[in-house]
Image (tube, grey):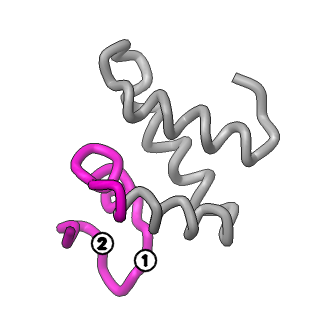
Amino acid sequence: MLHRHLTHQQFTLAGIDDIIARGNQQDWIALRWAALGDRTILDKIMRVCRARIADPYAQRYHFWMHYAQEHMGESA
């Protein structure tokens, strides 16, 4: 899936938000691999998720926040 805010394979905050909100399994796999290779992407994932985590129905953001925290060594 082409994401409107993802340019030149750079994971911007808007691009990450788009992947989390509308991405499919392949998009999530690509984000996961990018995050495992670059801790700044994990930080960006947490920044995006913090903005939406107050919504208990935003389950995708809860999932990614937990994933990023686990890989950054932070507790929830």
Q: Amino acid at mark 1?
A: Gln
Label 1 belongs to which residue?
A: 10
In magenta stretch: residue 46: no
Q: Amino acid at mark 2?
A: Leu
Label 2 belongs to which residue?
A: 6
Query: Does residue 49 sit above or below 22 in this rendering?
Result: above
- Secondary structure state at the residue bearing disc 1: loop
Q: Position of residue 23 (x, y in %)?
A: 27, 54
Which image quadrant is residue 56 in?
A: top left
- Secondary structure state at the residue bearing disc 2: loop
Along the horizontal axis of the image, is 10 left or right of 19? Answer: right
Magenta-drawn segment = 1-26
- Dot 2 and dot 1 residues touching (CB under 8 Å): yes
Give the quadrant of the N terminus. bottom left
Could you classify mark 2 by the number of other residues whose Cα lies within 10 Å: few (under 14), some (14-19), or many (20 or more)?
A: some
Give the quadrant of the C terminus. top right
Query: Does residue 12 sit above or below 13 in this rendering?
Result: below
In magenta stretch: residue 10: yes
Q: Position of residue 50 (x, y in %)?
A: 48, 31
Which image quadrant is residue 36 in?
A: bottom right
